Image (tube, rainbow, N blue to C red):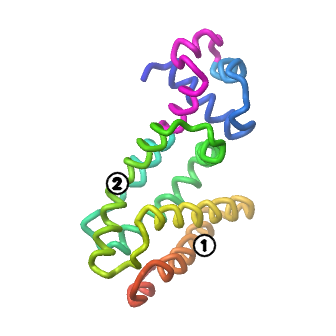
Amino acid sequence: MNTKKLQLIEAAIRLFAQEGVGVSTAAIAKEAGVSNGTLFNHFETKQMLIDDVYLFIKRNMADVILSHVDFSASVRDVCFTQWLTFANWSYDHLTEYRALDVLNSSQLLGETARQYAEELWEPMIEKLSDAQENGILHPLPPELLCINAQSYLHSLVVYTNRKQYSRHEMEMIFREAFRVYWRGIATSLSSVDEIN
């Protein structure tokens, strides 16, 4: 990705997080230090900019989170690692997280962008499906388990950010919250107490 395009995406992330998706392309271009014409050289429409910003954040988030997950581990360990890594990613990338939240709730995302972003998490869907086939998890659709986790994680990010917790305090809350989440999706509670 060239420098100007990256500047535009980073500027859009900051402004979407602060002002929402209604911010003008002129304001995004100004924040990036380029002309509005340069913005439209890289993104033919604001829709393309919105979708590219969304995918940029989702790819970076997935790269960080999934790189920490050992998919040969138990489903509980995979879910727990992903859960805690997400907690740390959101702590370290709060502006990106806020922009992502704004984009998700805007209903302006293109369907192709949403589908591509969902495909990034396919290894997780497969792990959940395998665990269901083996009777470890309740037989809800894996996508629903992920949506449930996303909603819970969002609440935790909002809560820990509002309370201005330190990283250590935030991690302790996320660890305990995972125990609660796991109790809701696992068919057996025997592995719940193994979480450190």
Q: Earlier in the sequence, mark 1 or mark 2?
A: 2
Give me the residue at 51% from left, 21% from top.
5
Mark 2: few/some/many CA within 10 Å (<14, 14-19, 20+): few
Check residue 128 for magenta coloring.
Answer: no
State the residue position of label 1.
173
State the residue position of label 2.
122
Q: Which residues are magenta?
A: 33-56
Q: CA distance from mark 1 to mark 2?
A: 27 Å
Residue 128 is drawn in which quadrant? bottom left
Is residue 28 positioned above or below 150 on the image?
A: above
Task: Classify mark 2: helix, strand or loop.
Answer: helix
Task: Classify mark 1: helix, strand or loop.
Answer: helix
Q: If the image is split into quadrants, where does the C terminus sit?
A: bottom left
Mark 1: few/some/many CA within 10 Å (<14, 14-19, 20+): some
Secondary structure mostly taken by the magenta-highlighted segment of the chain: helix
Q: Tag count in the figure? A: 2
Residue 169 at x, y = what percent?
62, 69
Give me the residue at 57% from left, 75% from top.
177
Residue 41 at x, y = what percent?
53, 12
138 or 172: nearer the eye? 138
Give me the residue at 36% from left, 61% from top.
125
Amino acid type of the residue that numbered disc 1 sits on in the rendered structure? Ile
Is residue 160 positioned above or below 184 on the image?
A: above
